[in-house]
Image (cartoon, rainbow, N blue to C red):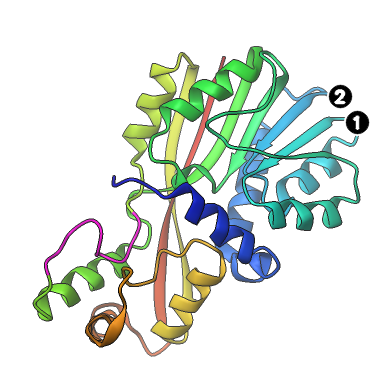
Amino acid sequence: MTGINRQRVQSSFHRGAEAYDQHTPVQQRVLQQLMQLIGQYPFAPNATALDVGCGTGRLLELLGRCFPDAALTGLDLAPNMLQQAAVRLGGKDRLIQGDAEQLPFADSSFQMVLSSSTFQWLDTLQCCFGEVRRVLKPEGRFVFSLFGEGTLYELRESWHQALLNTGREVTEQNNGTHRFHSSDQVQQALELTGFRDVVVWSELEQVWYPDVPHLLQAIKRIGAGTSRPPSGGGLGWRRVLHEMAAIYYERFGTPDGVPVSYSVIYAAGRR
């Protein structure tokens, strides 16, 4: 995986905060699955829990409904996401701006650390997972989801072929998509940081759009910025973009529109 520009990630999600929930059908379905997974583990009514990458506060809202006496904390890199979360939650939960790789909490602060659709934006997982283990109490649980290898594969394949068709060199910097972690990488990172009873699995989710422009706009609006051509723009990259759209239609289009696939990795571990 090439280096991820964390400042760009922060800025993208900061700009996309207000419209985020309107363009994230997969993320909302993943939240429901994650809540079912959380329900399989001991969660005391007054538990302390941290949501890493809390976004607009959806997971905190669901947790608050199920566990009204729990002490919930949300952390996010983007200020506007925290503002949206504050409006949603009405000031009930503690919200803090911070980095998943440098959690601003004391050792053994939480009984459970949770996260949904966040860790795919990290270059490596081990640093963050080590921080999570540090802030967990002994026997505490780490339960999370992230988008994994195979996510947006239609877009990745179409970009690759478009670059070849237009005589462009194919590199990690110009293929127009993000490189996602694999299930094996997630499991290895959990085990290397000392988590026990590790479980990891993945599920496929799909969303359909009427055409490629709508698909690209939706991906852009969630703040991820994975659909944009490399910096430099110009007529040359517009040609690649048009070629990519044509290939996408040809390979994956149907009378009902075009799909985009998400490989969702779910995982859990115990400190």
Q: Residue 150 at x, y = what percent?
A: 32, 54
Relative vertical location of residue 47 with respect to residue 108 in this rendering, above or below: below
SS for dot 1: loop
Q: Nearer the N terminus, badge 1 or badge 2?
A: 2
Kindly identify which residue carries mark 1.
69
User: Magenta region: which residues?
Assistant: 169-178
Confirm whether residue 106 shows in the render.
Answer: yes
Q: Residue 130 at x, y = what percent?
A: 50, 21
Q: CA distance from mark 1 to mark 2?
A: 5 Å
Task: State which quadrant residue 160 falls in.
Answer: bottom left
Kindly identify which residue carries mark 2.
46
What's the residue at 28%, 65% (across, down)?
A: 156
Amino acid type of the residue that numbered disc 2 sits on in the rendered structure: Asn
Determine whether label 1 and label 2 are within 8 Å by CB: yes
Relative vertical location of residue 77 with respect to residue 111 in this rendering, above or below: below
> Could you say which is closer to the camera, residue 169 or residue 231?
231
